């Protein structure tokens, strides 16, 4: 009977390990079973069968039982770079998520923010930059990690990045993270030794790396870019600027549809437009949503729909004031007297600038957020993964152990979504504010990561 019970437990542990690639399931196992897994990882035993041929899983098990302090996961007291960190868990989904938020800065003001406690620590094991922390974590982890970074999408034709610069400042944390982990996001080099214990995902699909430059992907972003290009190139001549903006609308029916839809009074119709025109027209998002279970897909899209409504409240007031000015100007006869309508030209140009102001970045950020959430909860098709690179199938078919690193505005959106689907918030450090906070005190965060 005891042998049967032990066999049942072994089979359950095997199933959990293969599903989640989280070796913490071995914590409370009997010593005999722990030894069986460890010995198999060391290739000195015939059992258990479930990890045979899974070199990544074997390495994770070896790391789990590692006793050398120098080879164990980092546990810094301070992490330089991020503004916020929260930890979330769901037993229902068997997922643990660490969400970092940053201010897109190059600073690491640990000593300034935390005084003597931080100053007495040298940069190293106890005080680390976030990129060094991730680098050590990915090398010593005992769980398979899915990292989600606010990196741009890369051209599907090349399956790799052609750009090396994603930020204007090479010292920004996001740029440094890109420099560290770019090769782990690219198909040709994903099997590199550094990358094999994790998957690296980009999620900023508002821009795509193509032909050695970052191109706008979203329809509204393309419209915004075209308007700014014309306005900036014709600053001194408002008449010529107005005529070129009018030509832009004349030549592009899609832009005219966008403008007219911005002033839709009915919330449902307006949101249908947002979800169809912005979310539904993005090929990256459409592709990932097909790989998400229907129930989760509905939860994500319902959440994004509500966020669109919330984030466009003030913008819709601006649009309702400016769009009629634009449409009236556009529909006027071309032969109107130029001098007589000088003020009208000026008002038209200003209205065009107003409807694509930087405030539109707030709702348009939802494109990246929709893609990120879809990718977090997607089902990885191991048949397709097999074609990608050697060892690609030695991974979990869903993301279970997750780290997100993004601008804090994105991070707050992910936290809000997890709350909406009943994830438990375990811990938090840092403050979401407009202050330039660039260091985290890790005292309240359980460490090492993924040990809860």
Image: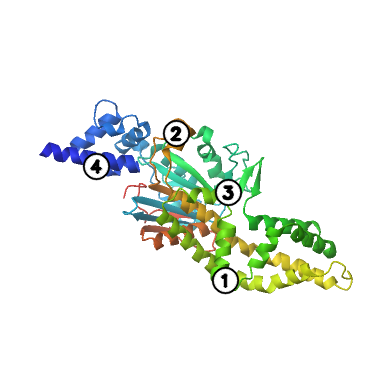
Q: Residue at x 32, y 39 (%)?
A: 18
- Residue labelled with disc 3: 172
Q: Is residue 9 left or right of residue 401?
A: left
- Residue labelled with disc 4: 12
Outermost residue toward the top in this view: 44
Q: Earlier in the sequence, mark 1 or mark 4?
A: 4
Foreground of the two, 27 or 300: 300
Q: Is residue 263 left or right of residue 383?
A: right
**Secondary structure category for the residue under label 1:** helix
- Residue labelled with disc 2: 386
Residue 196 position within the rendered picture, expressed as x and y whole percent measured from the top left: 43, 35
Residue 94 is marked as none
Query: Mark 4 against mark 3, which lies toward the viewer?
Result: 4
Q: CA distance from mark 1 to mark 4?
A: 50 Å
Q: CA distance from mark 3 to mark 2?
A: 35 Å
- Residue labelled with disc 1: 313
Residue 330 position within the rendered picture, expressed as x and y whole percent measured from the top left: 77, 67
Residue 129 visible to an observer of this rendering: no
Do the numbered discs 1 and 2 sit on residues whose CB atoms are within 8 Å?
no
**Secondary structure category for the residue under label 2:** helix
Residue 409 position within the rendered picture, expressed as x and y whole percent measured from the top left: 52, 59
Q: Earlier in the sequence, mark 3 or mark 2?
A: 3
Q: Earlier in the sequence, mark 1 or mark 3?
A: 3
Q: Residue at x 71, y 72 (%)?
A: 324
């Amino acid at each position: 009977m005891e042998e049967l019970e032990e066999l049942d437990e072994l089979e359950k542990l095997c199933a959990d390990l293969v599903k989640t690639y989280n070796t913490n399931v071995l914590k409370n196992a009997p010593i005999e079973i722990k030894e069986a897994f460890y010995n198999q990882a060391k290739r000195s035993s015939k059992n258990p069968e479930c990890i045979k041929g899974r070199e990544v899983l074997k390495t994770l098990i070896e790391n789990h039982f590692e006793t050398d302090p120098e080879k164990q996961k980092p546990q810094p007291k301070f992490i330089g770079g991020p503004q916020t960190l929260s930890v979330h868990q769901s037993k229902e989904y068997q997922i643990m998520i660490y969400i970092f938020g940053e201010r897109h800065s190059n600073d690491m003001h640990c000593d300034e923010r935390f005084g003597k406690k931080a100053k007495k620590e040298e940069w190293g094991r106890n005080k680390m930059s976030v990129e060094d922390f991730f680098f050590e974590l990915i090398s010593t982890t005992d769980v398979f990690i899915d990292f989600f970074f606010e990196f741009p999408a890369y051209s599907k034709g090349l399956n790799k990045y052609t750009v090396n610069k994603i930020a204007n400042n090479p010292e920004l944390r996001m740029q440094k993270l890109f420099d560290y982990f770019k090769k782990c996001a690219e198909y040709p080099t994903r099997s590199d030794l550094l990358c094999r214990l994790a998957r690296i995902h980009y999620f900023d699909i508002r821009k795509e790396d193509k032909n050695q430059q970052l191109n706008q992907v979203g329809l509204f972003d393309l419209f915004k870019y075209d308007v700014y290009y014309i306005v900036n190139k014709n600053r001194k001549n408002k008449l010529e600027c107005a005529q070129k903006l009018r030509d832009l609308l004349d030549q592009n029916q899609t832009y005219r549809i966008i403008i007219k839809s911005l002033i839709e009074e009915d919330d449902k119709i307006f949101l249908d437009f947002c979800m169809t025109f912005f979310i539904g027209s993005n090929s990256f998002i459409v592709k990932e949503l097909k790989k998400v279970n229907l129930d989760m897909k509905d939860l994500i899209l319902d959440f994004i729909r509500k966020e669109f409504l919330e984030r466009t409240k003030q913008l819709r007031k601006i649009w309702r004031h400016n769009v009629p000015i634009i449409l009236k100007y556009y529909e006027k006869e071309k032969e109107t007297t130029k001098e007589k309508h000088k003020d009208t030209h000026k008002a038209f140009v200003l209205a065009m600038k107003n409807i694509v102001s930087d405030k539109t970045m707030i709702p348009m950020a939802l494109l990246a957020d929709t893609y990120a959430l879809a990718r977090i909860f997607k089902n990885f098709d191991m048949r397709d993964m097999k074609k990608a690179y050697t060892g690609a199938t030695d991974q979990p078919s869903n993301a279970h152990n997750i780290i997100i690193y993004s601008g804090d505005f994105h991070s707050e959106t992910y936290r809000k979504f997890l709350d909406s689907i009943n994830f438990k918030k375990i811990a938090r450090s840092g403050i979401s504010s407009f202050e330039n906070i660039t260091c985290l005190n890790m005292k309240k965060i359980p460490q090492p990561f993924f040990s809860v």
